[in-house]
Image (spheres, rainbow, N blue to C red):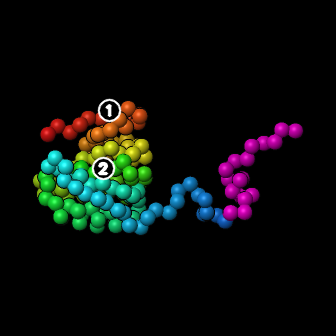
Amino acid sequence: MEQKRQSRADRRKNSAVPPGVGERRKGLPLEVRCLSQVVNGELVIYVQDPIAAENCASAERVITQHLREHGEKSVVFDMHKCTYIDTPGLTTLFEIRKRLAAEGRIMGLQNPSRAVLRMLNITLLNRVFPVRFTTDEEERIPTSKLRDEKR
């Protein structure tokens, strides 16, 4: 007799692992790490960790600190190491963008990871945030038409 394939839910029920352990999404770091440097007259902030509801307050605090230290008119967030972003994380980026616009500064995203780009496309925020690629990543990620911001 052929054995039926178990669903993921059935495997979890039958395993000795307690619920919540081994889930798909692991706990996110409570502190978001960012590095910044000025490249060709624009401030580039390298986001090192995922941004989600659990740590978006930390992300906003850290990013604001970098923005205060540098007064460049153009700010770019390099998101290639940011492996996950959810709606509160996108809201945080949008609020930062609004503050920068009020100060007369512009903001864009650079090299977003596949997960970040997917969320931008789903929420249609890829129309709000200018996205650019500085690597060959653009060919590997299926996406809607992306355009470089004209300066």
Q: Is residue 61 left or right of residue 24?
A: left
Count of labels shown? 2
Q: Quadrant of the N terminus?
A: top right
Can you tell which quarter of the image residue 142 is in?
top left
**Label 1 neighbourhood size at 10 Å, few (<14), some (14-19), many (20+)?**
few
**Foreground label between 2 and 1:** 2
Disc 1: which residue: 145
Please name the residue shown 56% across and 54% down the image: 24
Region rendered in magenta: 1-17
Please name the residue shown 61% across and 59% down the image: 22
Q: Quadrant of the C terminus?
A: top left
As helix, strand or loop, the secondary structure at mark 1 comes to loop
Q: Is residue 11 left or right of residue 137?
A: right
* Residue 121 % position (x, y): 37, 41
Residue 97 visible, this orientation:
no
**The residue under label 2 is which amino acid type?**
Asp
Please name the residue shown 16% across and 46% down the image: 40
Residue 3 painted magenta = yes
**The residue under label 1 is which amino acid type?**
Lys
* Residue 57 % position (x, y): 34, 66
Disc 2: which residue: 78
Q: Is residue 31 above or below residue 118?
A: below
Residue 10 visible, this orientation:
yes
